[in-house]
Amino acid sequence: MDLSTPDRVRDELLKTNPTFRELVNQHTNYEERLKELSHLTYPSDDEQLEESTLKKKKLLVKDEIYAIMSEYHVSH
């Protein structure tokens, strides 16, 4: 999810919806940790498992974010 690109719906939800805001924060945290893990030359088994798990969690959070945005767009 690119938070640097302007989006009216996303911006409004960030201001008014605490659940949406928390999901965006989670997504950002997962993204940052995945960047850290991707820079490891020889990741351990645990780090590889963490990377795989974080990718799945990040995707689920992204789906939730877009579902909220879609619902908001339809209702407004």
Image (tube, grey):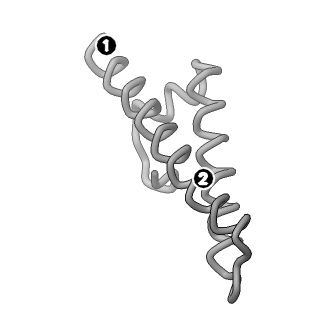
Residue under the point 46% across and 46% down? 59
Picture layout, residue 72 above or below residue 2: above
Mark 1: secondary structure = loop
Q: Which mark is residue 52?
A: none
Residue under the point 31% across and 25% down? 70
- Of label 1 and label 2, which has the lower sequence position? 2
Picture layout, residue 50 above or below residue 14: below
Mark 2: secondary structure = helix
In the current view of this chain or complex, which residue is farthest to the bottom? 41
Cα–Cα gap, marks 1 and 2? 33 Å
In the image, what residue type sits under mark 2? Answer: Leu
Residue under the point 46% across and 34% down? 10
Q: Is residue 31 left or right of residue 43?
A: left
Tell me which corner region of the image, top left, top right, bottom left or bottom right, holds residue 32: bottom right
* Residue that carries the numbered disc 1 in the rendered image: 76
- In the rendered image, residue 39, in percent from the top left (x then y), is placed at 67, 81
Q: Which mark is residue 54?
A: 2
In the image, what residue type sits under mark 1? Answer: His
